[in-house]
Amino acid sequence: MTWNRYCRGKFVPALIFITADILAAYLLFGLRINRQVSILLLGVMIGSQVLAVCFDYWKKKRFYDSVFRKLAKLDQKYLLPELLEHPDFGEGEVLTEVLYETDRAMHEYLRQYRDEMKELQDYMELWVHEIKLPIASLVLMLHNDNLLSGEKVRAQVKRIECAVEQILYYTRGQNTEKDYLIKTYSLEQIIGRVLQSEKEAILGQQIHLKLEGLKCRVQTDSKWMEFIVRQILNNSLKYLKGEADEICITGREEEDCTILSLWDNGIGIEESELSRVFEKSFTGENGRRVQSSTGMGLYLCKKLCGKLGHDILIHSVKNSYTEVEIRFWKHEFYQVLEDDRKLTKL
């Protein structure tokens, strides 16, 4: 720390000191106090001021020079706060606290980033394993012409499409604000597009499909919601009993929310597992029976619903039914979300 840098911003304190010295001299000489005594008092006063300034400069120079020396030696500059000595002046304490807080916030950000990267790595490994299965099945069919049929090929291609869609929405879900578009849609629009894409599976399994109350209108992102509903519907198709299968998709208006319900009379879920079905990679007892279960579908549904401001709940009785509810709240969440997007663009 140089003297010139130290003196920057000291104009007002220096002006106060000089003014005080002039007033003191005026009083001492104006009151006709002994000349030698007056000079001595003024000398002590001015000397004390000079010593105070020099001592303050020395303390700050020693501290800041130490900071810059340590900073120059560090390859990882963000470790600086951990090496700082505790300063004995107020400005240094404030600076140290700011650096400590900044360092803590950065470590928290890095921890969160590492967790997200670890989560992505784990899912990529799981996804690669999942995508290899239908590809291997297709290769086997090509080698055995008698196993090759349009229906079987379409089924394996559908598995690949579902796996690719999952990884696409998983990665997009890390930065939802760059991809969402909140508008008002009727549930009929969203459900209609999902059912159209899953038409072959529904007809192939001879499912009795019941639709009610889908004229309700909700605020959401249609692409994200179609993906969420498709994941839930695929789960229903996957875990049906194979006899008198029924799926009911209904919408209803409540005072504070609109509820979309997807109900099936499939094999249900153990009561002890209901609290864990939205956990990442959790498959439970049912998942061990079905080879294609990854435990990622409901996890992604929960994650994306949270980002869109919706709630998702599940109710089930083993060997009886499963019902998944998505709640679209009637509040100002989307207005705030839209305002944030506009500010980000600015």
Image (cartoon, rainbow, N blue to C red):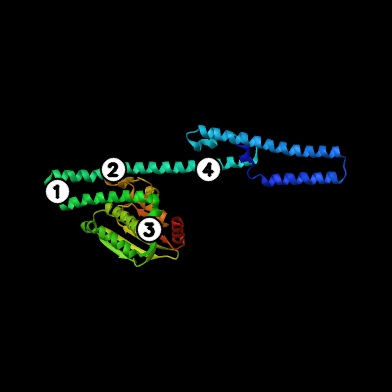
- For marks 4 and 2, the one nearer the N-term is 4
Q: Where is residue 57 shown, x and y percent of the image?
A: 65, 37
Q: Where is residue 125 shown, x and y percent of the image?
A: 31, 41
**What residue sits right under mark 4 in the picture?**
102
Please tell me whether mark 1 sits on a helix, a strand or a loop: loop
Q: Residue at x 41, y 56 (%)?
A: 308
The answer to whether the residue labelled 1 contacts the one labelled 2, judged by CB atoms less than 8 Å apart, is no
Q: Nearer the viewer, residue 190 or 12?
A: 12
Cα–Cα gap, marks 4 and 3 = 42 Å
**What residue sits right under mark 2 in the picture?**
128
Q: Nearer the viewer, mark 4 or mark 2?
A: 4
Please tell me whether mark 3 sits on a helix, a strand or a loop: strand
Q: Is residue 175 visible?
A: yes
Q: Residues within 10 Å of mark 3 (few under 14, many from 20)?
A: many
Type of amino acid under label 3 = Glu
Q: Residue at x 15, y 51 (%)?
A: 149
- For marks 1 and 2, the one nearer the N-term is 2
Q: Residues within 10 Å of mark 4 (few under 14, many from 20)?
A: some
Q: Is residue 270 visible?
A: no
Type of amino acid under label 4 = Thr
Type of amino acid under label 1 = Leu
- For marks 2 and 3, the one nearer the N-term is 2
The answer to whether the residue labelled 4 contacts the one labelled 3, judged by CB atoms less than 8 Å apart, is no
**What residue sits right under mark 1 in the picture?**
148
Cα–Cα gap, marks 1 and 3 = 39 Å
Please tell me whether mark 2 sits on a helix, a strand or a loop: helix
Type of amino acid under label 2 = Val
Q: Nearer the viewer, mark 4 or mark 1?
A: 4
**What residue sits right under mark 3 in the picture?**
325
